[in-house]
Amino acid sequence: MQNSTVHPYIPNTVPSVIEEMLAVTGASSIEEFYEDIPQSLRVKGLLNLPEPFLAEAELEEHVTGLLNKNRSTREVISFLGAGVYNHYVPSVVEEVINRSEFLTAYAGEPYEDHGRFQALFEYTSMMGEMLNMDVVNVPTYDGMQATATALAMAGRITGRSKIIVVSDVNPDLLSKVTDYVRSHTELVFVPTVNGLVDTAALAAQVDDATSAVWIQTPSFHGALETSGQAIADLAHEFGALLVVGTDPIAYGSLTPPADWGADIVCGDIQSLGIHQWFGGGRGGFIAVHDDPKFVMEMPSRLFGLASTSVEGEYGFGDVAWDRTSFALREEGKEWVGTAAALWGIAAGVYLASMGPTGMADLGNTVLARTAYAQQQLAAIDGVELGDSAAHFREFALDLSASGKTAAEVVTALRARDIEPGVAIGEHGLLVCVTERITTAHIDTLVSALTDFLKEK
């Protein structure tokens, strides 16, 4: 039976309006509009929602009650990661992005530009310098979209449809990429060995139909790939591209993928001066060399120095605009709508305030504390490391020999105001160590985990 309640904020819930829209479209029911959505993604049954609130005050009270159930990672010792990271955000970042000329910098054009274009140009310039790439886009919606777009670009550039996935990829990222490219691309998976790419297995899979070899480094488990050059050589031997998904915060201390053969580098900028925002602070980047073959396949906005209507005068603005879906509309190679311009400005302020020395210190600190955490946790009876690769920020623990499941560990330590990590499978625990995690925090985790595993 159709609900007769009219939603106060959605006028199209009026039953008569629904019937009118169905009549115009020729559909017999709303369900027809959702036929393309796989059954596996659909909610079965009803959502756990209250009855509609007809008064705004009641709705506000309800939502406030839901929000009060959350606990910020500032209230606990948090080793949570898996895609959103608790890095420190300098106060100057919030000061700048809360200025009125930046705060509404979404994707549309302002009537007047009070520095937004230059701010984004500076961000892309600093990203390019850190990644040793020439061209970086204005941030897309998130790193998942950026990665999917990078792989789609590889398909268009090579005219091929096979992507070889060689790293342990975040399941959420893989899900989004698969959904994005599944209509025109085949994904082939090569299992990792000890957390790293199995180059022998890759050599058996790469061929003339391969558009790209896709590496994630650090991987979902935080492993740093050490055979990048050999992988790049394998891909290039068959005319395929090397697409590297990564986190830019690592490249104050690590060699950027461009230096070992990456053709396209992509990922998320959340770690660069953007709070976790309960999973909402995301922005995707794509970086390529200064090659028109690659640049003209980038659907995202690019900001650079452009000539003006006054001869000899230059300003900051869109470059190569004619390649975008904004200019080409339905003839565009790929549609890109939502941008995350404000987060690009935040990342630019962050990079400027940190500088090369600060980014190097940060990277070295995270590497050192990650190694310390691995060493101390692996010394606990019943706890083993998931692999012996070098790791940045994250690593997996195997709790199989402890007699406890990962879910039990999370529940027990959460009661002690410690978020020990993300449970992956029955006995896997993904632990994340940022610069905000001190050796004292690590020692606290070790002590609490040791005590819990000793319990009968």
Image (spheres, helix red, strand yellow):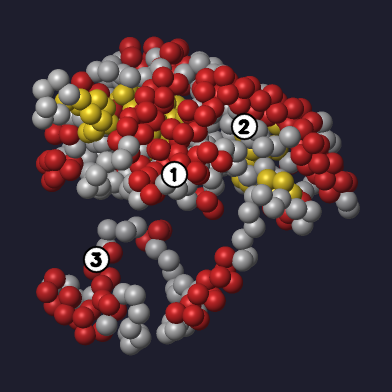
In the depicted structure, whether residue 260 falls above or below residue 342: above
Neighbour tally class for label 2: few under 14, some 14-19, many 20 plus, Cα within 10 Å: many
Q: Is residue 217 visible?
A: yes
Q: Compared with residue 410, is residue 61 higher up or lower down, i.e. above or below? A: below
Circle 3: element type: helix
- For the residues labelled 1 and 2, the Cα–Cα distance comes to 27 Å
- Which amino acid type corresponds to the residue marked 1 in the rendered image? Ile
Q: Position of residue 323 (x, y in %)?
A: 16, 33
Q: Which residue is mark 2?
A: 393
Circle 2: residue type: Arg
Badge nearest the viewer, 3 or 2:
2
Q: Residue at x 64, y 35 (%)?
A: 434
Q: Quadrant of residue 158?
A: top left
The residue depicted at 21 percent of the width and 85 percent of the height is: 16
Element at label 1 = helix
In the rendered image, which residue does mark 3 sit on?
Answer: 33
Task: Report the Cα–Cα distance between label 1 and label 3.
Answer: 39 Å
Question: Based on the displayed image, in which of its 4 quarters is residue 15 positioned?
Answer: bottom left
- Which one is earlier in the sequence, the residue at label 3 or at label 2? 3
Of the 4 image quadrants, the one containing the N terminus is bottom left
| Between 382 and 121, the one nearer to me in the picture | 121
Q: Position of residue 320 (x, y in %)?
A: 18, 29
Q: Is residue 162 visible?
A: no
Q: CA distance from mark 3 to mark 2?
A: 43 Å
Looking at the picture, tell me which residue is in the foreground, 192 or 91.
91
- Say which residue appears at 64% left-offset and 28% top-offset: 366
Element type where label 2 sits in the image: loop
- The mark that comes first in sequence, 1 or 3, is 3
User: Which dot marks residue 97?
Assistant: 1
